[in-house]
Amino acid sequence: MIRVRLGSVYHYGIFVSEDEVIAFGLPPVPEYQNHPHRFVVCAVDVDVFSCGVIPEVAEYDLRERRQKFSDRQIVANARARLGETGYNLLHNNCEHFANECVFGEKRSEQTESVRRRWLARPICDIYLTDIVQPCPGEPLYPPQRDAEIRACSHDGLRAARYAAWQLLLFAGRRSLALDPERLKFRKTHSGQWTCDKMFFSLSHTNDVAAVAVSNAPVGVDLEALSDMGRRFPDGGVQQLYDSWLTSGEKQLYPPTDMGFLTCWTRKEAVYKRTGRGSFHPLRVDTTKAEARTFRLPGGSERILSVSGEHAGSAHLFTTDLIKTTLLAPEEI
């Protein structure tokens, strides 16, 4: 395997002889921009391949020497693909091709480096979707969570949990490029589900599920303002406001349904991000937490709060798992 650095990228190929270097496409230089073999596996001489740059020869470590094919097989692999098309900069480029010929494994350090830098940016994406009842029958991943959801005896709660978990798998793929079946989910002793490759938080109302995914710990809570009278009748909101808000919070949030719900969703979001064990409202102080609260558009007013290191970069989307739309809600 050889490569040459051309501008900001490397061009990879399989060296057979001075007259035969097999690569996926011609070098990415202006003179070949419109050439018919620009994105075709082709054989060229070393001068065409290198464009006047001294080629670098791959050095294999012990593991790679054990993994690689024989020289004869590598050449056969490369020649067998002459004329192949389907070039893709991110998923099927010249480095993928060379590694597949040598190791039988498609990989590209250039692509992975870009992907690592991309995923290292602050990510805090929140998705909302309608809850469908009765819940669909397709199994969810992992099977343990699927079984847990299906065992729920309350139809509405089962549908909400199903929608939230289905939305989580969608969000992980869309925002973090994670294949759901390659994720490792684990349930902690406190009953909280965690994942090895992303941080997430779930919430729902009677008819809408919300999921936050991030590359840092995150918490999200969604409540409907229209549910306040049903959940807290006969002045219950005022009593909770007096009992569950700290003195500092009472200075920030007015003693109204909206004030209480703004603080309450923030408490829930902060707790989900940082808490363990039982939830005690007075132990969660939102005055010093990194959190944002939004009033969502729609017929039934909903309040959503998110807490996390990257909450300042939060983006909100609504989706039916096919079409996704970026929201611009009012921030409270």
Image (cartoon, grey):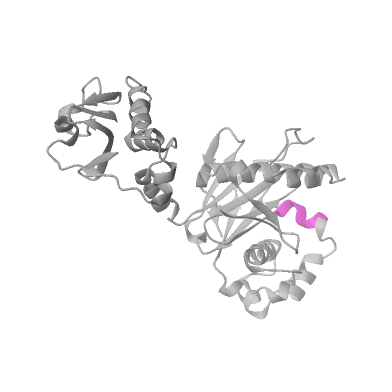
Is residue 79 shown above or below 55?
above
Q: At x 37% / y 49%, what residue is drawn?
A: 113
Residue segment shown in magenta:
223-230
Q: Quadrant of residue 233?
A: bottom right
**Image location of residue 259, percent across then percent down:** 66, 65
Q: Is residue 217 left or right of residue 159?
A: left
Q: Is residue 30 left or right of residue 327?
A: left
Number of residue marks: 0
Q: Quadrant of residue 141?
A: top right
**Image location of residue 23, percent across then percent down:** 28, 30
**Image location of residue 36, percent across then percent down:** 24, 19
Name the residue nearer the viewer: 123 or 283: 123
- The answer to whether any part of residue 298 appears in the image is no
**Image location of residue 38, percent across then percent down:** 25, 25
Q: In which quadrant will I find the C terminus?
A: bottom right
- SS assignment for the magenta stretch, majority: helix
Q: Is residue 263 left or right of residue 40?
A: right
Is residue 224 shown above or below 280?
above
